[in-house]
Amino acid sequence: MKEPAVSADPTQTLAFDTSCHLFDGCGFPAPGLHSFLFKPLFGDADSNLYFNKTMLLALLGSIIIVGFFWAAFAKPKVVPGKLQLVAEAGYDFVRRGVVYETIGKKEGEKYVPFVVSLFFFVWMMNVWSIVPVAAFPVTAIISYPAVLAGIVYVIWVSLTFKRHGFVGAFKNFTGYDKTLGPVLPLSMTIEFFSNLLVRPFTHAVRLFANMFAGHTLLLLFTIASWYMLNGIGIAYSGVSFVMVIVMTAFELFIQAVQAYVFVLLTCSYIQGALAEHH
């Protein structure tokens, strides 16, 4: 999926008109589609060969994650230092709390590195939303969750065919159960489309929609705080600013939850691929 490069109106940016306030005769600069579109930092948008802010954040996020775990485990100690302790806690949380609980220790161990990487990558992409200057969740651009969901989809389908063969995989995808009798064809059709078409779509959209909505709300209250900072509107601005703080705290929680849900569903799909069909 291609990410839009620039907004239709070149005067609109992620920021807003800082000279516009309540009672100044200008309308409220509400966040919109332009708040999620970025001009290329370099390259040509028309030729689709460009590098923009979200790509930079995704690259920096990847470097930060790799650098953190490299620093933590480059020289592991029996008595871990603070950095190693934090890294081990994060790794162990995903391994035991997600992979082992969903797939099982025996089958799941080989998937731990992938799931841990996926969790921290998604989490980092979400956290950019509340980082000053960055101030944007990369996963609020649908192409990023779509690619991640696509990777999970390929792994899930491949594992299903590898474990069960063509006939077994077909039964797995369609939920074949001969005890259903006359409704079996309808049930199989619904399950087939649900598993192979709807599942990857909802996997991506669930993450995207939550981060998109959360960022929009943060923008709304942030812009409102500045817009109403004029005359009697200062009282309303204070209330809006309190909401910015509340929403930021809430976003911190949601960012972690969405990363957790994304990898939990990933493990659920892998477990389904590995499970024996009855």
Image (spheres, helix red, strand yellow):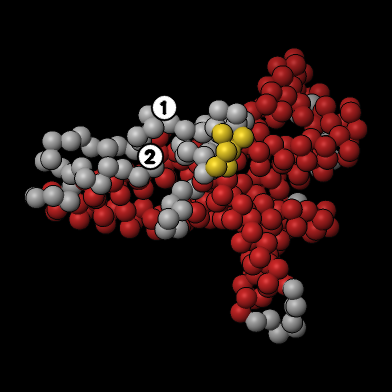
Label 2 to label 1, Cα distance in Å? 11 Å
Is residue 91 in view? yes
Q: In this view, does 120 lie to the left or right of 106?
A: left
**Residue 240 location (% of width, % of height):** 24, 51
Mark 1 lies on a secondary structure that is loop
Q: In this view, does 136 lie to the left or right of 164?
A: left
Against 123, is 207 above or below? Answer: above
Is residue 206 in view? no
Mark 2 lies on a secondary structure that is loop
Q: Mark 1 points at which residue?
A: 8
Against 218, is 28 above or below? Answer: above
Numbered circle sitting on residue 249: none
Q: Which of marks 2 and 1 is nearer the N terminus?
A: 1
**10 Å crowding of disc 1: few (<14), some (14-19), many (20+):** few
Point out the residue furthest to the left here. 232
Q: Name the residue under label 2.
A: 13
**Residue 193 location (% of width, % of height):** 69, 23
The mark tally for this picture is 2
Tell me which residue sits at (35%, 34%) in the image.
11
Tell me which residue sits at (43%, 52%) in the image.
135
Three-letter amino acid code at the position of disc 1 = Ala
